[in-house]
């Protein structure tokens, strides 16, 4: 009886059913698309941070650079090379000087490596790894020779001309500065940290046998630009390192954390930072433990800066950031407003339909239908209308997601954090410390990458759509059924007489 009556009523009120279902379908389709795009933005943000943050890394620990002491030059300011009187070698009146220096990356602050044990001892920490972010800067210069009078060429007033020495053939000078990023890490830490977020393309990775050895793994892009290959050597702080492998970022849309990776103990020794580190990467036993670990680490290391993936995602800049803000703000509120409007339309049309069916409900109550049965009848009709709208909304939403994935709009993104501070701090290829990075440039991180935005379809999104359609139908049916149940049979029949 219920099904028969339900089918007859829906078939007899096709216009109302079509309007209610259409409104619900558009609202649910918008919710599906907004949620899918939001998920795509989160995936894109994760891909930007993945290579510098580390696969499986949940938390990073660094230390905010302290203000320089009185008389101390601020870290990150202009750098200078000091050469003594006997520096370099002189040939044909030209002195060639060469100096290489390995030091903490600008904008970073190193701290005691004992902090790694402190972090590792925090409850629910699954793994922890320490790194040391460094920058290798090499100065190469050619200067004209100087005579006993201290002037280039001849003594003042001698009437002679400067000698033809110097790289420009007229007693002039020339110099160049090359800079690249170096990351010291423990070769045993493969599950967490920057090296866990790269893909080996040639040679081998660092192993526990490399501790204390002068071996290096290079970013493949940097190696290509610098003309280096596996089996060759790269000079770091005047020391030759054997190149044993080349790596690229695990995601094609991201850059690796550094140009060169070397064992942590060797990096500490060459840079004069023995027992010092710049970052700790932490993996939680469960995602539910992240907040607890962050609080415990902040308590144990009050001077440290403790960041989670959610904190670092806010550092992603470019049009990807704009898209994220748009989805988070405009998209969310728009979908809520449209959904509310669809629910309101369904409620109003249901109440209007109940009002037009006064005679019908009065007759049903007169022949013995209870208020509960009438409410169930109206609610069932509205529920079916909502489900029809939900099915239509899912279909429209999936078509919209398909269109987005086919178009694959390209967004630009970069990890806009200070170089060397936490993840992304070690500049990647093309950054200030990468190939082409100038001497004394501002210390801002990370190469800008282009991300093809995709909108993934998940089971949760479909379930949300079904739940919304059921909720809308039940809400409209409950209100309409309540209105119908309040009708008195005598008044309903009298209004028709």
Image (cartoon, rainbow, N blue to C red):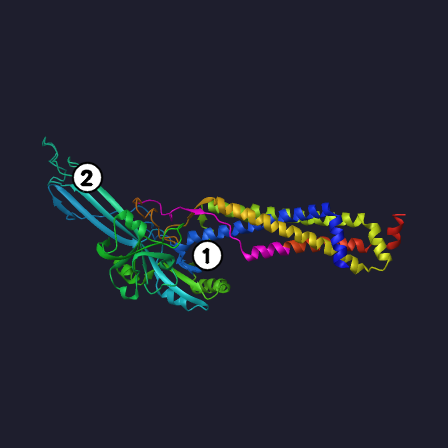
In depth, the one of 183 and 87 nearer the eye is 183
For the question of whether residue 487 can be seen, the reply is no
Disc 2 to disc 1, how far (Cα)?
Answer: 49 Å
Q: For residue 474, which quarter of the picture?
A: bottom right
x and y percentages locating residue 197 in the rendered image: 38, 57
Q: Which of disc 1 and disc 2 is earlier in sequence?
A: 2
For the question of whether residue 102 can be seen, the reply is yes
Identified at 18% across, 47% down, the residue is 97
x and y percentages locating residue 435 in the rendered image: 30, 46
Image label count: 2
In this figure, which residue is indicated by the disc labeled 2? 173
In depth, the one of 187 and 472 nearer the eye is 472
* Magenta span contains residue 312: no
Magenta range? 440-467
In this figure, which residue is indicated by the disc labeled 1? 309
Q: Residues within 10 Å of mark 1 (few under 14, many from 20)?
A: some
Element under label 1? helix
Residue 59: mark in rendering: none
Q: How crowded is mark 2: few (under 14 residues within 10 Å), some or many (20 or more)?
A: some
């Amino acid at each position: 009886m219920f099904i028969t009556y339900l089918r007859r009523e829906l078939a007899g009120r096709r216009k109302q059913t079509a309007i209610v279902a259409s409104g619900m379908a558009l609202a649910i389709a918008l919710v599906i698309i907004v949620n899918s795009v939001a998920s795509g933005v989160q995936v894109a943000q994760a891909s930007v941070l993945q290579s510098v943050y580390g696969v499986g890394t949940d938390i990073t620990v660094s230390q905010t650079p302290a203000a320089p002491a009185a008389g101390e030059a601020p870290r990150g300011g202009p750098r200078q090379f000091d050469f003594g009187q006997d520096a370099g070698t002189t040939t044909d009146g030209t002195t060639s000087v060469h100096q290489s220096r390995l030091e903490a990356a600008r904008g970073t602050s190193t701290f005691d490596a004992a902090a790694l044990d402190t972090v590792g001892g925090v409850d629910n920490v699954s793994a922890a790894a320490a790194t040391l972010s460094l920058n290798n800067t090499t100065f190469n210069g050619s200067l004209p020779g100087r005579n006993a009078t201290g002037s280039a060429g001849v003594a003042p007033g001698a009437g002679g001309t400067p000698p033809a020495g110097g790289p420009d053939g007229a007693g002039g000078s020339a110099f160049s500065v090359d800079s690249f990023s170096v990351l010291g890490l423990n070769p045993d830490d493969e599950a967490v940290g920057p090296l866990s977020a790269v893909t080996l393309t040639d040679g081998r990775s660092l192993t526990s046998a490399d501790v204390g050895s002068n071996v290096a793994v290079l970013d493949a892009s940097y190696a290509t630009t610098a003309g280096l290959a596996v089996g060759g050597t790269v000079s770091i702080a005047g020391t030759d390192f054997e190149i044993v492998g080349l790596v690229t970022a695990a995601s094609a849309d991201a850059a690796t954390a550094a140009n060169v990776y070397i064992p942590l103990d060797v990096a500490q020794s060459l840079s004069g930072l023995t027992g010092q580190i710049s970052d700790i990467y932490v993996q939680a036993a469960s995602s539910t433990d992240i907040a607890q670990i962050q609080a415990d680490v902040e308590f144990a290391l009050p001077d440290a800066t403790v960041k989670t993936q959610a904190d670092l995602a806010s550092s992603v800049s470019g049009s990807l950031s704009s898209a994220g803000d748009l989805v988070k703000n405009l998209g969310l509120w728009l979908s809520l407003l449209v959904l509310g409007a669809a629910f309101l339309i369904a409620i109003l049309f249901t109440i209007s339909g109940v009002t037009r069916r006064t005679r019908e409900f009065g007759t049903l109550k007169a022949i013995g239908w209870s208020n509960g049965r009438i409410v169930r009848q109206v609610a069932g009709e509205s529920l079916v209308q909502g489900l029809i709208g939900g099915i239509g909304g899912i279909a429209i939403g999936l078509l919209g997601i398909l269109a987005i994935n086919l178009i694959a709009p390209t967004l630009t993104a970069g990890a806009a954090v200070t170089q060397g501070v936490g993840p992304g701090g070690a500049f990647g290829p093309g950054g200030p410390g990468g190939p082409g990075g100038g001497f004394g440039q501002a210390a801002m991180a990370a190469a800008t990458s282009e991300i093809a935005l995709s909108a993934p379809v998940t089971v949760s999104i479909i379930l949300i759509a079904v739940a919304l359609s059921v909720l809308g139908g039940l809400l409209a049916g409950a209100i309409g059924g309540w209105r119908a149940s309040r009708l008195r049979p005598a008044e309903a029949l009298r209004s028709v007489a």
